[in-house]
Amino acid sequence: MVKQKCLVMFSGGLDSRLAIKIMQDKGFDVLAVFFKLPFGTGCCSEGCSFNFSQLQGIELKIFDCSNGKLLQEYLNVIKQAKHGTGAGVNPCIDCRIFMLKKAKKFADKKKIKFISTGEVTGQRPMSQQPKQVKLIGKETGLEQRIIRPLIDFYNISGRSRKKQIALAKKFKIKYPSPAGGCLLCEKELKNRLKFLLTRGLNEEEINLVNVGRHFLIDKFWVVIGRDEKENKIIEKLKIGEIIEPDYPAPSAIIFGGRNKKLLLIVEKLIRSYSKKGSLKERKKFEKYKI
């Protein structure tokens, strides 16, 4: 007898791993879908997710939204935020809709009827409350096709992970500890991300979002390293204009061109954050911080 196929939205975390195992236990032939997002995928890396899918003997489809056309589509989702944002610039509902629509299109091509998720009611404040879950189902056209095994079969709700941990033991699976997360949710990065999204970003620039100290000087975006590791990240970039001082100090990168006035300011900025600098000098640049 041929098993019915099911596509599982797989983030790599405990809940989505359980969704895979439960759907397999229910007799489905599972195909996992992993979205590599530019501002953080959450629980698990692409490699980690691939390893788990291999151990379970299932195919893994990766949607790489960190570059090319998919990146620009995803950035537009963030900019438009039809259903609002959280404390940062995180459009969680719109993000979920974006991924599920991509998954639906892929599932339709594969003639797969059901899409399964590891959602738990009440676990995430923006996208996993009953009202939002219903909205997402309606907007994606998947109301009758989504299976949420942790909710539908085990009636799990809330932020406690006790029931999920017990299920992990039952299915004999390992899982990563909650870590990382989405940079879009970070309150302290809100102003920086708003500026950068308005400016426009490419893949390499996105990798700088959470690196170094950021300044907006006369409409020029300037980033300086906070330590040796970040200096090396900046120095290896093939974009912008890189400044490497000839004394112990932060390396810097300038986006948007250059002029003599700007270079003088950046040189003073670099010096202020070097061992030669002082808190008084650094305070002069507070107004430029983003």
Image (cartoon, grey):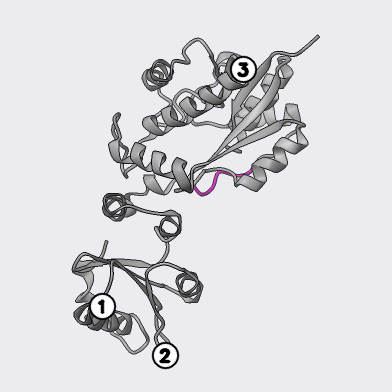
Principal secondary structure, stretch drawn in magenta: loop
Which is nearer the N-term, disc 2 or disc 1?
A: 2
Q: Secondary structure at mark 1?
A: helix
Say which mark, if any, is on residue 56: none
Which image quarter holds the C terminus? bottom left
- Residue 246: mark in rendering: 2
The region drawn magenta spans 176-181
> Where 192 falls versus 8 (above or below)?
below
- Residue 250 image position (x, y, % from top left): 40, 79
Q: Nearer the viewer, mark 1 or mark 3?
A: 3
Q: Quadrant of the N terminus?
A: top right
Tell me where residue 272 appears, x and y as whole percent. 29, 82
Q: Quadrant of residue 260?
A: bottom left
Residue 171, placed above or below residue 214: above
Residue beneath label 3, please?
A: 112
Residue at x 56%, y 14% (from the top left corner): 152
- Up-down: is 279 above or below 31? below
Mark 1 vs mark 3: which is more N-terminal?
3
Q: In the visual, does 68 lie left or right of 262?
A: right
- The amino acid pointed to by label 3 is Ile
Q: Is residue 149 left or right of residue 245?
A: right
**How far apart in space, not on screen, are marks 2 and 1 (Cα)?**
20 Å
Residue type marked 1: Arg
Nearer to us of marks 2 and 3 is 3
Q: Secondary structure at mark 2?
A: loop
Say the numbered circle drawn on residue 282. 1
Q: Nearer the viewer, residue 255 or 142?
A: 255
Q: Nearer the viewer, residue 169 or 10?
A: 10
User: What is the secondary structure assignment of the residue under circle 3?
Assistant: loop
- Alpha-carbon neighbours of circle 3 within 10 Å: few (<14), some, or many (≥20)? some
